[in-house]
Image (cartoon, rainbow, N blue to C red):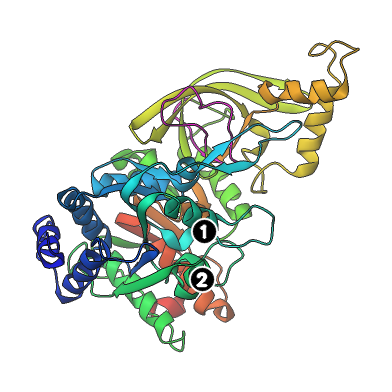
């Protein structure tokens, strides 16, 4: 099959007639997948909100078998993988779950991440939300982009497609997204091809979500020289919400679409904690610390509890889980714990597993349990003579902690409100964006990028909470 014939096959698998930009990208992708393409080729697809890049990817996935190529779908987070897999019509995996194998560490929360062997051949690896992939963080063995490249290209005739949106937030602590930068990929020995889609097709002409996302993107493209003008009037999917009306609007969204399809995006962990506390008290009327149906977000990778679940070798930082049942709670070693059954979205649908939760992090303003508190737990466990024989050497005690349920307790936080970085990669029907108390001097590129990322998380309804007058013209 020629590249032109393969491009025609991709177009046939699209659910709509492609525009000129998309046709050009399809042509470039068909040449990238050709047998004559260099083995070190990588394709970078930058597509803004509503440009149909995910639908185009789905059409490509359905067409690859016609040219004898397999594919593997990946994303940086569990939520992003779930969304990507739904659009593409096949399972998607987190990058960490696909490329690493993990070993428990003696006296540590988790062991080192070791690269798996890529035993696949003639396979295209497609990564969505690639703008979230971190590069060199300055810490030893902590360069996800480099590890991803090494894993993929160690396979026989395997190549990589990176799909992202450079208008979104870059990885935490980075100014730009290294996976979307051709120079970063060249430094890793690759030959990048790049395409950008700007023409919008998703959600139709009357989408206020898309209108406002585009207004923010254009303000960023202009160097934030002008303040973007957000609009709700005339759009059925965008709503301005005051602080007084917020509880009622949240309750309405929860009743209509369920807790799993609603999210409030805040500007800091502290504000997220305050919102979570208020939502549970004033909207959900929950007095107990943990109840059945509770929505939680995992605050730290955990390799202990989910291994019995097929296709789920660990629970990743950022995964969203639902409490199916609470068996009991206890206070021990100076901490609070709960034994629960959790449901999580996996590659084969929703899976359930039992776990012990660390309740200390639920309403903490920190992203996860501090090193000092983890050290306190470690020392308390090591001194527990009910766990070890008094004569047992220190190193054997530390080794025994590898399977201790308290040491491996899953760290979680409430998931009704979270920061934009935590929400990035996922989509919800109803998204509430906290814009209250933003001073005029904060208006600029950093805020617009944050707001663009938050706005583009919404699928059906966007609620802007007390936006500053300057953003409403």
Q: Position of residue 93 (x, y in %)?
A: 40, 43
Nearer to the camera, 58 or 191: 191
Is 345 drawn above or below residue 126 in the view shown?
above
Contact between marks 2 and 1 (CB within 8 A): the answer is yes
Residue 246 visible in image: no
- In the picture, the disc for residue 184 is 2
- Range of the magenta residues? 292-315
Residue drawn at the location 36% of the way across and 74% of the way down = 230
Q: How many marks?
A: 2
C-alpha distance separating marks 2 and 1? 9 Å
Which of 200 and 325 lies nearest the eye of the viewer? 200
Q: Is residue 215 magenta?
A: no
Q: Residue at x 47, y 23 (%)?
A: 353
The N terminus - image quarter: bottom left
Majority SS type along the magenta span: loop
Considering every residue shown, the one lying at the far right of the view is: 391
Location of residue 465 with respect to 343 vertically, above or below:
below
Left or right for 241, reference 450:
left
Q: Which mark is residue 320?
A: none
* 261 displayed left or right of 379: left
What's the residue at 39%, 71% (across, down)? 192
Element at label 2:
helix
Location of residue 174 in the rendering, given as x and y in whole percent from the top left corner: 58, 68
Instruction: Tell which circle, 2 or 1, labels the residue nearer the N-terminal end.
Output: 1
Q: Residues within 10 Å of mark 1 (few under 14, many from 20)?
A: many
Choose top left, top right, bottom left or bottom right for residue 163.
Answer: bottom left
Residue 473 position within the rendered picture, expressed as x and y whole percent measured from the top left: 38, 81
Q: Position of residue 225 (x, y in %)?
A: 46, 89
Q: Name the residue at the bottom extreme.
A: 225
The residue tagged 1 is 145
Out of 327 and 36, give the one closest to the viewer. Answer: 36
Element type at marker 1? helix
């Amino acid at each position: 099959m020629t590249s032109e014939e393969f491009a025609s096959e991709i177009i046939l698998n699209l659910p709509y007639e492609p525009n000129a930009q998309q046709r050009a990208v399809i042509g470039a992708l068909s040449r990238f997948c050709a047998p004559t393409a260099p083995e070190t080729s990588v394709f970078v697809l930058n597509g803004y909100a509503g440009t149909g890049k995910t639908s185009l990817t789905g059409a490509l996935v359905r067409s690859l078998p016609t040219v004898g190529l397999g594919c593997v779908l990946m994303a940086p987070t569990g939520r992003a993988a779930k969304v990507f897999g739904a659009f593409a019509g096949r399972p998607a995996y987190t990058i960490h779950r696909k490329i690493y194998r993990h070993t428990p560490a003696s006296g540590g929360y988790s062991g080192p991440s070791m690269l798996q062997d890529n035993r696949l051949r003639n396979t295209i690896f497609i990564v969505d939300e690639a703008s979230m992939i971190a590069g060199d963080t300055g810490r030893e063995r902590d360069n996800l982009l480099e590890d991803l490249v090494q894993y993929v290209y160690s396979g026989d005739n395997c190549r990589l497609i990176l799909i992202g949106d450079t208008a979104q937030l870059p990885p935490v602590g980075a100014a730009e997204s290294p996976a979307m930068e051709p120079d970063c990929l060249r430094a890793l020995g690759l030959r990048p091809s790049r395409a950008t889609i700007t023409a919008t097709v998703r959600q139709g002409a009357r989408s206020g979500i898309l209108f406002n996302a585009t207004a923010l993107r254009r303000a960023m493209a202009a160097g934030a020289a002008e303040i973007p003008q957000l609009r709700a009037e005339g759009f059925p999917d965008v709503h301005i919400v005051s602080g007084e009306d917020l509880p009622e609007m949240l309750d309405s969204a929860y009743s209509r679409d369920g807790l799993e399809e609603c999210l409030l995006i805040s500007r800091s962990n502290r504000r997220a904690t305050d919102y979570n506390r208020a939502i549970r008290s004033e909207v959900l009327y929950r007095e107990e610390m943990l109840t059945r149906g509770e929505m939680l977000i995992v605050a730290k990778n955990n390799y202990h509890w989910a291994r019995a679940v097929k296709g789920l070798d660990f629970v990743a930082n950022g995964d969203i889980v639902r409490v199916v049942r609470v068996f009991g709670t206890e206070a021990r070693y100076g901490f609070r714990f709960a034994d629960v059954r959790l449901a999580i979205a996996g590659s084969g649908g929703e899976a359930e597993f039992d776990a012990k939760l660390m309740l200390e992090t639920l309403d903490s303003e920190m992203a996860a349990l501090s090193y000092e508190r983890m050290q306190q737990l470690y020392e308390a466990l090591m001194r527990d003579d009910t766990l070890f024989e008094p004569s047992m050497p220190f190193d054997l005690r530390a080794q025994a902690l590898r399977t201790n349920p308290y040491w491996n307790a899953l760290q979680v936080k409430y998931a009704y409100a979270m920061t934009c970085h935590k929400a990035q990669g996922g989509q919800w029907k109803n998204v509430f964006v906290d814009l209250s108390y933003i001073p005029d001097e904060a208006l600029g590129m950093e805020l617009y990028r944050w707001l663009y990322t938050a706005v583009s998380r919404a699928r059906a309804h966007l609620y802007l909470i007390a936006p500053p007058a300057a953003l409403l013209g």
